[in-house]
Image (cartoon, rainbow, N blue to C red):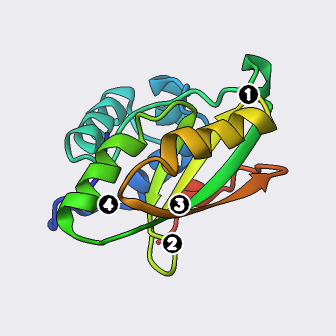
């Protein structure tokens, strides 16, 4: 799924909405009753607010934080990809394929010398080499790929702070 970042212009989040989002960012499995209690609102009000946040596209989904090493993917990397050309056809072609490549966890379209960053998980160094050679450098729209190993990944608080 490619997210365009579209959120309605007239969207207004109050402090309760922001607190709900912060709580869910920390623990997406928190029950409606616990969320309501933490925010000081009725459970029915909490449910209505959560539905509205989903309907407005603010809450896009809930995901499990999986230990990739436990699944046999001991090595993670960020692969920087520079395209050979930047026409719509080349960008669309790469974007349409990148997320479906084996081992790709996330695709970031970025600015600078790099056009895309791919977060990948693979069993080991040989698999990473094969991924780059077989799935990236063979693509005509890819001019260059550079790999950085991830030694450690620490999830940040992000939106877990209620903010203004």
Q: Quadrant of residue 38?
A: top right
Q: Looking at the image, is mark 3 or mark 1 earlier in the sequence?
A: 1
* Res 108 visible: yes
Q: In the rendered image, which residue does mark 1 sit on?
A: 73
Residue denoted by label 2: 114
Q: Which mark sits nearer the N-terminus, 4 or 1?
A: 4
Q: Quadrant of residue 65?
A: top right
> Measured along the vertical axis of the image, is residue 162 above or below residue 17?
below
Numbered disc 1: secondary structure: loop
Distance from Cα at disc 4 to Cα at disc 1: 39 Å
- Residue positioned 28% across, 60% down in the render: 91
* Most distant residue in the top direction: 71
Residues packed near mark 3 inside 10 Å, few (<14), some (14 to 19) or many (20 plus):
some
Are the residues flagged by discs 3 and 4 in contact, CB closer than 8 Å? no
Disc 3 target residue: 162
Task: Please tell me which of labels 2 and 3 falls first in the chain.
Answer: 2
């Amino acid at each position: 799924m490619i997210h365009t970042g579209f959120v309605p212009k007239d969207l207004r989040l109050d402090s309760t909405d922001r607190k709900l989002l912060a709580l869910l960012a920390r623990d997406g499995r928190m029950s409606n009753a616990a969320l309501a209690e933490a925010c000081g609102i009725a459970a029915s009000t909490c449910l209505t607010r959560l539905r509205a946040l989903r309907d407005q596209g603010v809450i896009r989904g809930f995901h499990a934080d999986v230990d990739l090493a436990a699944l046999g993917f001991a090595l993670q990397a960020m692969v920087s990809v520079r395209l050979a050309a930047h026409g719509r056809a080349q960008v669309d072609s790469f974007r349409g394929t990148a997320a479906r490549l084996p081992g790709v966890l996330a695709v970031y379209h970025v600015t600078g010398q790099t056009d895309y960053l791919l977060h990948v998980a693979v069993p080991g160094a040989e698999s990473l080499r094969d991924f780059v050679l077989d799935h990236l450098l063979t693509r005509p729209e890819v001019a260059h790929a550079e790999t950085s190993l991830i030694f450690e990944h620490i999830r940040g608080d992000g939106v877990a702070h209620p903010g203004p």
